[in-house]
Image (cartoon, rainbow, N blue to C red):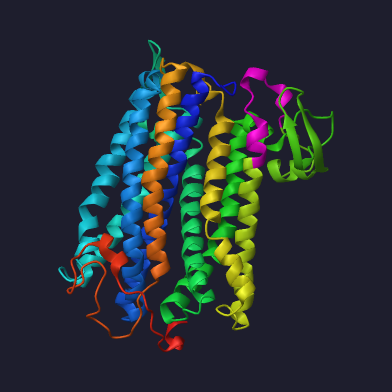
Amino acid sequence: MFGLEALDLARIQFAFTVSFHILFPAITIGLASYLAVLEGLWLKTDRQVYRDLYHFWSKIFAVNFGMGVVSGLVMAYQFGTNWSRFSEFAGSVTGPLLTYEVLTAFFLEAGFLGVMLFGWNRVGRGLHFFATCMVALGTLVSTFWILASNSWMHTPQGHEIIDGRVIPVDWFAVIFNPSFPFRLMHMATAAFVATAFFVGASAAWHLLRGRDNPSVRKMLSMAMWMALIVAPIQAVIGDFHGLNTLKHQPAKIAAIEGHWENRPGEPTPLILFGIPDMQAETTRFKIEIPVLGSLILTHSLDKQVPALKEFPPEDRPNSTIIFWSFRIMVALGMLMIAAGVWSLVLRKGGKLYTSRPFLHFVTWMGPSGLLAILAGWFTTEIGRQPWVVYGLMRTADGVSNHSYTQLGFTLVAFVVVYFALFGTGFAYMMRLVRKGPHTGEGDQQRPGGPGRKRTPARPLSAADEGSDATTADLSKGN
């Protein structure tokens, strides 16, 4: 069917589940740190706007965290069901790393999450802030271990192969493998940028509908400062990540660039657009800029970038896919930088909260960070092919011995269940976003929100709250 084999269905199934899962941790990482910042600012300034925003986003964080945990469990089981040969080969490395994630990050998050969500009126301010910070730290520790495991699969080191299995001999080398620092920084920063645009789009949406209050203004202001500062930093990190990839996975870079062969003595051009043809070994309809490929990828005007024809056909990643996924990621990144710069211009002119073209642009940019993460993840993982552990084990050798029918049935089941379950969760989360933050200086006894005295301390009951936002002194929200 559609020319697919059992291996293709196993890869599609894992890609589908990881694509759903990665969205939730990305927002969880960003929102956890955002909540820590909000509570810290509230403790320092005692301004009600920060407390209002904390309670608003903590509800959304709770829903997102729950969906992230559930979707992550499914992925872990797939290592044993669909990729048992890979688990047998590399489980002595990936197993302990994922276990460390549970023993450190998950326990840290779970231990303090209850205090963070339900302890607002039950513990002191200092302890509650500490709990929020520990949850934020836990999300980053989780990122550390997950990226350590995945990066080792891209640039494996610190091991020996004995009797056909990987045996770790240097855990420091295993964890801090060559690509790990760059991929960790790139993913963590991407989570912060994605969350910034999620928060910013929520604020812009409310402002476009006339819900202009201090909380909404503060949301937009903080989000755009984050975009202005962090989006350009992400571009720099991406450049270093690209240099590292060129060194350790040159075939991936060649496929990303759609670059098939070098001309003797000439620098490599940059192909802006085109359609790579894996069968014909060429990039059709290409638009290229001379020399720029060498300048961007090697930081020189004369060095050449490895070409796809320098690698055996069976070792080439699918350039047709990652050529475009990479460009989607870069294009979205440039739009994020543009949004940050535009916000600075409007801020200086006093029009940040009133420019409707800008607010519409930010609203549409809401999912841009998540889409960029997916595009980048596809580029990274498809670009690693045909290896599941780069240079050590091919993907075809790591899959379980399941039939086409079995994998096809489970793939359909996953699609149906995921869209039903997580689609409902996402719809509920968007319902909370549309409610908007409650505002009102000095209103300490209003209903709703985690730990409030007048209603049960259940974040999932928040959708039943009243949503009419009151207008207050807008100058206090700037």
Q: Position of residue 276 (x, y in %)?
A: 73, 32
Q: Which residues are magenta?
A: 306-324
Task: Name above or below for residue 218 compared with residue 292.
Answer: below
Q: Residue at x 51, y 75 (%)?
A: 209
Residue 313 in the image, given as x and y percentages of width and height: 67, 19
Q: Nearer the viewer, residue 63 or 236?
A: 63
Tell me where residue 351 sits by quadrant.
bottom right
- Residue extending farthest to the top is 163
> Which corner quadrant holds the N terminus?
top right
Choose between 256 and 40: the one closer to the eye.
256
Whether residue 115 is visible, yes or no, is: yes
* Residue at 35%, 40% in the rendered image: 72
Q: Position of residue 158 (x, y in %)?
A: 42, 27
Location of residue 289 (image quadrant): top right
Q: Nearer the viewer, residue 372 or 175?
A: 372
What residue is at 66 percent from the left and 45 percent from the top?
327
Residue at (29% x, 35% y) in the render: 99
The kind of secondary structure the magenta stretch mainly shows is: helix
Q: Position of residue 310 (x, y in %)?
A: 71, 22
Q: Is 317 contained in the magenta span?
A: yes
Seen from the viewer's position, the closer of residues 225 and 66 is: 66
Residue 177 at least partly seen: no
- Residue 87's image quarter? top left
